[in-house]
Image: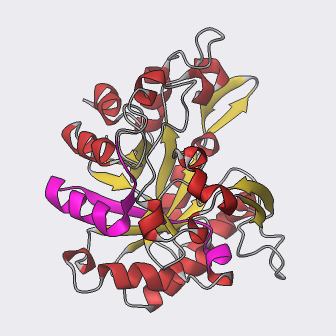
Amino acid sequence: MQTTSLIAHRGASGWAPEHTETAIRLAASLGADAVEPDLVASRDGVLVVRHDNELSETTDIASHPELADRRRTQTIDGHELTGWFVEDLTWSELATLRARERLPQLRPLSARRDGAEGILRFTDLLAIADDTGLDVVAELKHATHHAAIGFPLDEMLADAVAGTGWTAPGRLVVESFEETVLHEVRARGVEARLVYLMDEDGTAADLVGREDASVTYRAQRTDAGLAALAQRVDAISVAKGALFERAGGVLRTSDLVERARAAGLGTITWTLRPENAFLEPEHRLGADQAAWGDWQREWLLIAELGLEGVFVDHPDLWHRVTT
């Protein structure tokens, strides 16, 4: 079986609130090879480690009356959102917030740590990764949106790693659902493996409104699409569902990994989680969405594909099916 890189999705986020120092250090202790942070920009140009630029799901910002007037509605990548946004706060204001579990109904044990820790800057995470020996797979979130409001994430990331050990080959991966920003990162001389994130459906935000807006993620996973991508990026990272197909009502793995490999691309998948809510229907046990289903069976099917990497919320569970 090919060695697959174990990427802790926002840390060991199945056991502790995502993107916290505890989650990252726990991931290292549970055998992860790398940690995946999501990066967004503050009002004063700081790269902040958060799942999204809207803060109410993952912090206690709603309980800060001094920030109540920052709540607003805006459209990001075609979706209208109401809440508090990272780009409206300075780092000193963001530093007053406390992290919360994003999925408390599914992960009540993790939710017990709500409020125990603050949030991190990208530079904070790099220091923790240095200390624990983890590689970093950094996702640039909403790159087109950030560029439009004056925060080019490619430039900010390049500045953050300039003059550090993270410029050494092999330590840093940069990924995005938008290919444009990946090329901008490379143009700035950042030594990083470039990974193009692909949802099951839809079109990348940087393609919407352009002549090539009809180029969907599905179209990019055809043989022709993969061959074209292989000229521009190092690997693709696909939603877990893209690795499965049903023939005659029977679930089986698709040939995507094999076709991507033939085109010269590595393949990563996201996100492996044991709860019924995230498993294929054939692997769910009972109706309780928070209960763990037959995750071992599903993950073993994925392990047998020989992927370049897997995103997991519980790093220790991956080792159970691969050792």
Residue at 55% x, 68% y: name it: 89
- Asked if residue 309 lies in the magenta stretch, the reply is no
Q: Kindly tell me whether residue 222 is visible in this rendering.
A: no
Residue at 54% x, 75% y: name it: 43
Residue positioned most to the top: 286
Above or below 254: residue 203: below
Residue at 29% x, 48% y: name it: 21
Q: What range of the chain is rendered magenta?
A: 117-146
In which quarter of the view is residue 319 placed? top left
Residue 196, position as x, y percentages in the image: 55, 66
Residue 139, position as x, y percentages in the image: 48, 63
Quadrant placement of the C terminus:
top left
Q: Is residue 138 left or right of residue 26?
A: right
- Colour setting: secondary structure
Residue 251, position as x, y percentages in the image: 65, 27
Residue at 23% x, 36% y: name it: 30
All told, the count of numbered labels is: 0
Q: Is residue 291 left or right of residue 208?
A: left
Above or below 17: residue 237: below
User: 20 or 266, which is in the foreground?
Assistant: 20
Above or below 231: residue 249: above
